[in-house]
Amino acid sequence: MYLSIMKGLPTLLLLCSTALLCSAAPAVEPVTCSEDGGAAAARMAAHHIDENHDHGYKFKLSEIKGNKVEKVDDGCEIELQLELMETKCHNINPMHFEDCMIREETDRAVMANCFVRISVRNGDARVRNYHCDTRKDSEMVMFCPDCSNLISLHDPDGMKSVREAVQRVNENPTNQNYFILKDVGRIEIGSILGMNMFYGAEIALVETHCPMGSRILPEVCRPLCPDRARHAFCRSTYYISEGLESVECDYYPPMNSTALGDGEREPICRPEDTVGLPPPPAVCYCGRPPLPHQERRMPHSTHSAHSPAMDRTQISTPFAPAPS
């Protein structure tokens, strides 16, 4: 569902279905120790990185810059150097990363240079570790001085536009429950002909327990468990002189739509550390609480190490440093 909420317009425009946003992943090729098996290994690595990247945007394989295979008795060790490009699909988007569109250079695209180690033993391939450094794809200011510029995700005025966008979404009468902020993807500042300054933000929202119309402030509502919550990816435009102009959202259905039984309540989720982002919590867990931060490991790969540059507090560093 694509929702456009224009300032001063009570009519909601429902333009497309969430079903069209989902796509099946292409068939997975087996990773082998052959010299020409780099493509399959690179695809597996890119998939692994996106699966363990729990914020921001999905990345897509752009180029294999290095592929070294070292044979061992029962298999091999594969070392890859990959160039990944940021896509327009936020992490909450169910679309497979290979089907996502790469962000244009004029949109301040981000690229990642990743070093990945894969072990293949008796035909079983596993990503052992990886490290990625992210940076802007190119410096567009010299080529497009009038283009919008990315700013810090912690910018006070930018975050003001984000809060008003979330409030606008929660005025949508077609929602059953309130939504809260899950992630700030990017904030940019621009102008029209050097005048009329504006903020453009891309944000991810998650559905909460609180029904629409309740007297509870949405900011204090608990998010539903990740598999039972609807998510929304929204783009907002906020003019400094006029305030919030518009909010456009894509809505994604819950992965688990099983109806609750009579008298059964929604499971209670435990919020994860928000890593310095403004409240409310970014992610919640169902059932057993997560490990303490210093002991927490990446899912599906107990030996994987992901890049600090792809952490929530670091992803903006190359192009939007947080205030000192």
Image (cartoon, rainbow, N blue to C red):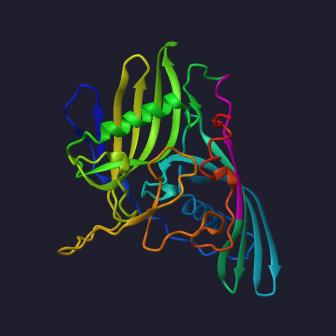
Residue 183 as seen in the image, left or right of residue 142: left
Of the pair 114 and 213, the residue shown nearer to us:
213
Residue at (17% x, 75% y) in the render: 262
Is residue 37 something one can see in this rendering?
no
Residue 264 as seen in the image, left or right of residue 297: left
Quadrant in which residue 2 is drawn: top left
Does the magenta portion include 131?
yes
Does the magenta portion include 20?
no
Residue at (47% x, 53% y) in the render: 282
Residue at (52% x, 34% y) in the render: 187
Please, is residue 150 above or below residue 31 in the view? above
Picture coordinates of residue 69 (x, y %)? Answer: 79, 71
Picture coordinates of residue 110 (x, y %)? Answer: 62, 42
Is residue 6 something one can see in this rendering?
yes
Picture coordinates of residue 85 (x, y %)? Answer: 61, 48
Quadrant in which residue 72 is drawn: bottom right
Span shown in magenta:
130-142
